[in-house]
Image: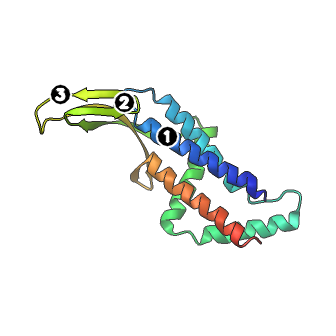
Amino acid sequence: MNVERVEKKLREARFFLKKMSDHERLAFEDKEPFDFYLSAFLSAGMSIRGAFHVRQDRKRNEVIRKWKGDWEARLTPKEERLYNFMHTDRNHEVHEGGSSRTVKTENRELGPGVHKLASGTNEVFGLPGWSSFIPTPAYYFTIDGTERKVTEACGEYVALLERIVTDFKGQTP
């Protein structure tokens, strides 16, 4: 396995996760960029998972595949559900017309004062205790019947991917 290439894909996944997080903070913004970032994130994750084989060396490939299978078997049920969900969602994204993510609108509360948002500055005037609300898009996955913010689930997935790479480097078969 080319560890340097896998580490680059990890950086790529983190990069697109940050882009999704930044985009989430925008108000009144186009939702399509979030989808682009999510697609790239899911593809980077699949590249990391797919790197655990060496095509040119069948014997080494078998050893690494067994190591990966053993590693995956040690995931907690919650980790395994997330790990499998991301694999399935990536396949939906690439082969079936898009990720399963849903978009809702959430109202962000803004009290009196100046608020710097990613999409601009908003100044709210009013009496103390008075608030204004600004609609913002919120992106969700439904994983095993539980609604989860996309960026939170993706953050946990990156942690799993980082762990498999770290464990592999520490115990290279």
Under mark 1, the amino acid is: Met
Q: Which residue is mark 3?
A: 125
For label 2, count other residues whose C-alpha is less than 10 Å away and answer few (under 14), some (14-19) or many (20+): some
Q: Judge by depth and name the residue closer to the eye, 17 or 65.
A: 17
The residue to which callout 1 is attached is: 20
Q: CA distance from mark 2 to mark 1?
A: 13 Å
Give me the residue at 47% from left, 52% from top: 153
* Image quadrant in which you'd find residue 132: top left
Q: Say left or right for 56 vs 81.
A: right
Distance between the alpha carbons at the discs numbered 2 and 3: 19 Å
Q: Position of residue 152 (x, y in %)?
A: 44, 51
- Mark 2 and mark 1 residues within 8 Å of each other at the beta carbon: no
- Residue 158 occupies quadrant: bottom right
Q: Which comes sooner in the sequence, label 2 or label 3?
A: 2
The three-letter code of the residue at mark 2 reads Ala
Q: Residue at x 36, y 37 (%)?
A: 104
Q: Is residue 128 visible?
A: yes
Q: Secondary structure at mark 1?
A: helix
| Image coordinates for residue 173, horizontal then vertical, percent | 77, 72
The alpha-carbon separation of the residues under discs 1 and 3 comes to 30 Å
**Does residue 47 show up?**
no
Q: Which mark is residue 27?
A: 2
The correct choice, above or below, for 88 with respect to 121 in the image is below
